[in-house]
Image (cartoon, rainbow, N blue to C red):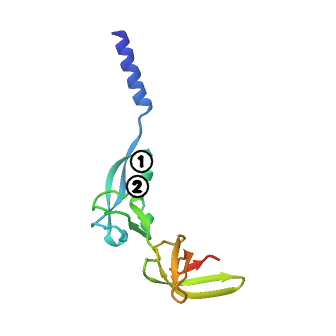
């Protein structure tokens, strides 16, 4: 019996030592359904209280400013906390759409028109077909939606 009590004491002690703290926090939630690829802020936001373990808090959007320029990666449900993994940066370039190609080297700037073969956000490398020559080039998407061709 003493051995069993000692086991219970050790089990309880280990549970207490590995206990995680949780807190009640107010997190932004969508006010309406946000479909994949749509801007999260345009759906409207509310707040709701959640009890979240401290080590899990960093997985969720805690400030509405974190949603600026983000779109939903999957359908977001009203009243549910928004995980950071549910968000992605909006594409500046869409596949099939015309884009401005820009090549810069040693004070020389050449521009042309192309058709994006891939969608991409700012800073991503995409493939673009030059409309005049038909040649496919790769470049980095710029903040204005143009593609900086790599030389």
Foreground residue, 134 or 111? 134
**Whether label 1 touches label 2, CB < 8 Å:** yes
Foreground residue, 113 or 31? 113
As helix, strand or loop, the secondary structure at mark 2 comes to loop
Q: What residue appears at the point 52 percent right and 75 percent down from the top-left corner? A: 127
Foreground residue, 119 or 21? 119
Give residue 96's position: percent from left, percent from top: 42, 80
Residue 55 against residue 14 in the figure, above or below: below
Q: What residue appears at the point 36 percent right and 70 percent down from the top-left corner? A: 37
Residue ID for mark 2 = 60
Asked whether residue 131 is in view, the answer is: yes
Q: What residue appears at the point 57 percent right and 75 percent down from the top-left corner? A: 139
For mark 1, does the 10 Å Cα neighbourhood hold few (<14), some (14 to 19), or many (20 or more) residues? few
Label placed on residue 86: none
Position of the N terminus, as image quadrant, is top left
Residue 45 against residue 94 in the figure, above or below: above
Asked whether residue 61 is in view, the answer is: no
Asked where in the image residue 97 lies, by quadrant, the reply is: bottom left
**30 sits to left or right of 67:** left
Give residue 12's position: percent from left, percent from top: 38, 25
Give residue 133's position: percent from left, percent from top: 55, 87
Give residue 85's position: percent from left, percent from top: 41, 57
Residue furthest to the top: 1
Position of the C terminus, as image quadrant, is bottom right
Asked where in the image residue 148 lies, by quadrant, the reply is: bottom right
Residue 115 against residue 41 in the figure, above or below: below
Residue ID for mark 1 = 56
């Amino acid at each position: 019996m003493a051995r069993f009590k000692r086991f219970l004491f050790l089990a309880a002690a280990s549970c207490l030592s590995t206990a995680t703290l949780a807190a009640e926090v107010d997190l932004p939630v969508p006010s309406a359904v946000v479909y994949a690829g749509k801007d999260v802020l345009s759906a409207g936001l509310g707040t709701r209280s959640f009890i979240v373990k401290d080590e899990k808090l960093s997985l969720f959007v805690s400030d509405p400013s974190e949603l600026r320029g983000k779109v939903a990666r999957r359908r977001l449900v009203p009243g549910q906390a928004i995980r950071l993994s549910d968000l992605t940066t909006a594409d500046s370039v869409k596949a099939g759409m015309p884009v401005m190609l820009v090549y810069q080297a040693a004070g020389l700037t050449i521009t042309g028109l192309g058709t994006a073969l891939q969608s991409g956000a700012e800073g991503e490398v995409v493939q673009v077909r030059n409309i005049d020559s038909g040649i496919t080039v790769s470049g980095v998407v710029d903040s204005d939606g143009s593609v900086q061709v790599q030389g």
